[in-house]
Image (tube, grey):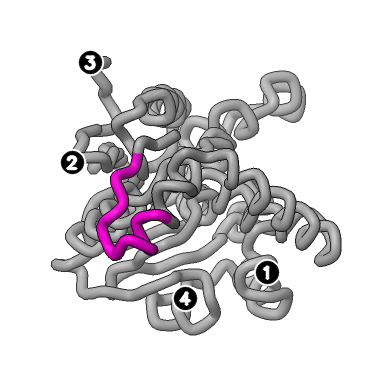
Amino acid sequence: MTAYENILIETKGRVGIIRLNRPKALNALCADLVRELGQALDGFESDLNVGCVVLTGSDKAFAAGADIKEMKEKSYQDVFLEDFITVGWEKVSQIRKPIIAAVAGYALGGGCEMAMMCDFIIAADNAKFGQPEITLGTIPGAGGTQRLPRFVGKSKAMDLVLTGRMMDAVEAESCGLVSRLVPLGQLMDEAIATAEKIAGMSLPATMVAKEAVNRAFETTLAEGIRFERRTFHATFAFEDRKEGMNAFADKRKAAWKHR
């Protein structure tokens, strides 16, 4: 198994767990951490025994943002030529298996953006979200101005992006950024139980379901419905679709083959 310096990984049954692990920097997203995260995600993506991934941090911080010390001396030429943030960062949004963000403490800037790249967020009651880039004389660069309005609406997104203020967990749930809110001590149990439930479904079915929901943000309603319909039709080629329907008719538990 690959040795990582900035993350910890483990598997529990069919659930892959990635924990951001730079405690002294509140899990600031340095280049090495992002590179290691991509490697870990690739590993879980290719592992047929993993059906869902949980991405988390510490009780104090999911991730407090990008590593400002690492980027403060960069020039326009530097960031343009290396396509700064694009390489590696978008990996979280590109994996095909379901991925849950389990957020406690600070999820700010790049940390908030990385959580939004996941399929949904389960938050502890001490979670705080925000896009404080404006206070540094810049703007969000990893999707904050694009994903946030899609989740919470224009007014709330403008408020957060233009003031740089933090939003607590209750507000985050009430505006739709967070799917559910749990006590800090129950965060990982809840996230892993949810991931286990997803991983207990047919893997190809969860993958196409994820793809179909994501299509809603990329196209018109009519085209989205058309995509959903054709994708639904395509599931009739799955062995698991036949098994699932037969199991329902026979009043027994389905025995998935993930095919």
Relative to 90, say whether 101 is above or below.
below
Tell me the distance, in whole angstroms, between the alpha carbons under discs 4 and 2.
28 Å
Residue carrying label 2:
12
Secondary structure under tag 1 reads helix
Relative to 12, say whether 181 is above or below.
below
Residue 105: assigned label: none
Tell me the distance, in whole angstroms, between the alpha carbons under discs 2 and 1.
41 Å
Q: Is residue 63 left or right of residue 96?
A: left
231 vs 117, nearest the viewer: 231
Q: Which residue is at the far top?
A: 2
Q: Is residue 159 left or right of residue 186?
A: right
Q: Earlier in the sequence, mark 2 or mark 1?
A: 2
> Which residue: 68% across, 69% down?
162
Whole-percent x, y for residue 48 in the image: 35, 28
Secondary structure under tag 2 reads strand
**Quadrant into which the C terminus falls:** top left
Relative to 161, say whether 259 is above or below.
above
Q: Nearer the viewer, mark 4 or mark 3?
A: 3
Tell me the distance, in whole angstroms, between the alpha carbons under discs 3 and 1.
43 Å
Q: Is residue 248 left or right of residue 70?
A: left
Mark 3 crowdedness (10 Å alpha carbons): few <14, some 14-19, many ≥20: few
Q: Nearer the viewer, mark 4 or mark 2?
A: 2
Mark 4 crowdedness (10 Å alpha carbons): few <14, some 14-19, many ≥20: many
Amino acid type shown at disc 3: Met
Quadrant of residue 80 in the image? top right
Q: Nearer the viewer, mark 3 or mark 1?
A: 3
Q: Earlier in the sequence, mark 4 or mark 2?
A: 2
Q: Does 249 appear in magenta?
A: yes
> Which residue: 51% across, 65% down?
130
Quadrant of residue 164 in the image? bottom right
Whole-percent x, y for residue 186 in the image: 17, 67
Residue carrying label 1:
162
